[in-house]
Amino acid sequence: MLLLLLLLQLLLLLQQLLILLLLLLLLLLLLLLLLLLLLLLQLLLHLLLLLLLLLLLLLLLLLLLLLLLLLLLLLLLLLLDAAIFTSAEKVKLKKHLACK
């Protein structure tokens, strides 16, 4: 009878140890999932930083294109101004020659 009681108590202790082991494994699994989540967040952060870098590069290229267009417009205005100036000078010269 005493042996049966000791065996029953041993089984209860074993059951408690198994439950404790199961809880520890569950905690380990949760920690691993948390680590995986942190790694995924870090990867997402790197991807967002890469996207931000690409957007800044695109903005830089657009600003360079705008600068080139403004320089082209300035050159066109300078050429147009030079053409008008020479035409005005030609008209003055023709009037001057016509007067003589």
Image: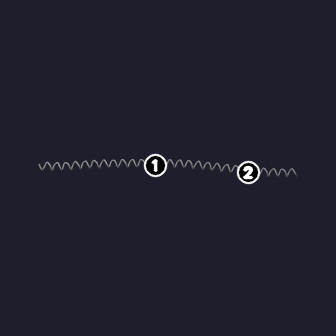
Q: Is 96 displayed left or right of 56 in the figure?
A: left
Q: Is residue 8 left or right of residue 80?
A: right
Distance between the alpha carbons at the discs numbered 1 and 2 = 53 Å
**Residue, disc 2:** 20
> Residue 49 versus residue 26: which sits nearer the camera?
49
Q: Position of residue 18 (x, y in %)?
A: 75, 50
* Nearer mark to the viewer, of 1 and 2: 1
Q: Which residue is mark 1?
A: 56
Color style of the picture: one colour
Number of marks in the rendered image: 2
- Camera-side residue of 69 and 94: 94
Q: In this view, which residue lies farthest toward the right?
A: 1
- What x and y, as percent, mark residue 26? 68, 51
The local secondary structure at tag 1 comes to helix
Mark 1 touching mark 2, by CB under 8 A? Answer: no
Type of the residue with mark 2: Leu
Image disc number at residue 87:
none
Residue 49 x, y percent position in the rendering: 51, 48
